[in-house]
Image (cartoon, rainbow, N blue to C red):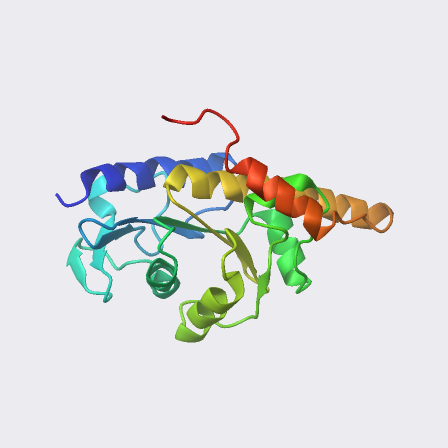
Amino acid sequence: MLLSNERQALVEYGKKLITSQLTTGSGGNLSIYNRSEGLVAIKPSGVDYFEMTPEDIVIMTMDGEVVEGNLKPSTEFRFHLALYKNRPDVNAVIHTHQVYATTIACLNWELPAVHYLVGYSGNKVPLAPYATFGTQELSDNIVRSIGGYNACLMANHGLVTVGPTIASAFTVAEEIELVARLYYQAKSIGEPVVLPDDEMTVIVEKFKTYGQQRS
């Protein structure tokens, strides 16, 4: 079975998307790119995360050809592959429908630096214009809008996060949901104070050495 470790990780993190309230049912999707093999492991379309098994995971080439798996890949495979092609630092992609981030996306707003934890994305979370799910237009919008950020809101849709590992992409999704909730709540009371770009530059740099660093 190709990419057995990646398959197992997707099953594990798919369940975490549900238990962490970052998506519901079979919504959203996630994938891992094994660059040495040139293959992508991706969630199958419409399969419940708690019913999904490693054998259900679809293995694709970077040209979109299914090389192993009996199920259809996620309808959003286009932007997963496009992100891997355009971002050599990215080996995992997660797409969610988490409530607070999606609320901001439904307002067609970017998420500004109302809290320093937005630094998991960059100095903000940019917004990709709306396009129908599963389309090339949506893929193009996301790649163009995310640039070098680690997260991107999808107008009237949800959030996409990226990282060098599935664990890092998941962390970005969690932290951005917290910031989105804080922004929502602050906007309900008054006008939030946004941290300046120069401070966020410092924060993003500090995040590079945050936590336990492997030698």
Is residue 176 visible to the viewer in this orientation of the structure?
no
Residue closer to the observer: 198 or 42: 198
Residue 84, position in %: x, y? 34, 58
Vertical position of residue 104 compared to residue 1: above or below = below
Residue 134, position in %: x, y? 40, 68
Q: The N terminus is located in which quarter?
A: top left
Vertical position of residue 138 compared to residue 112: above or below = below
Residue closer to the observer: 123 or 199: 199
Name the residue: 19% across, 61% down: 66
Residue closer to the observer: 130 or 151: 151
Residue closer to the observer: 27 or 88: 88
Name the residue: 38% across, 63% down: 86
In the image, taking residue 60 as reference, residue 197 lies left or right, namely right
Is residue 152 visible to the viewer in this orientation of the structure?
yes
Q: The C terminus is located in which quarter?
A: top left
Name the residue: 36% across, 64% down: 82
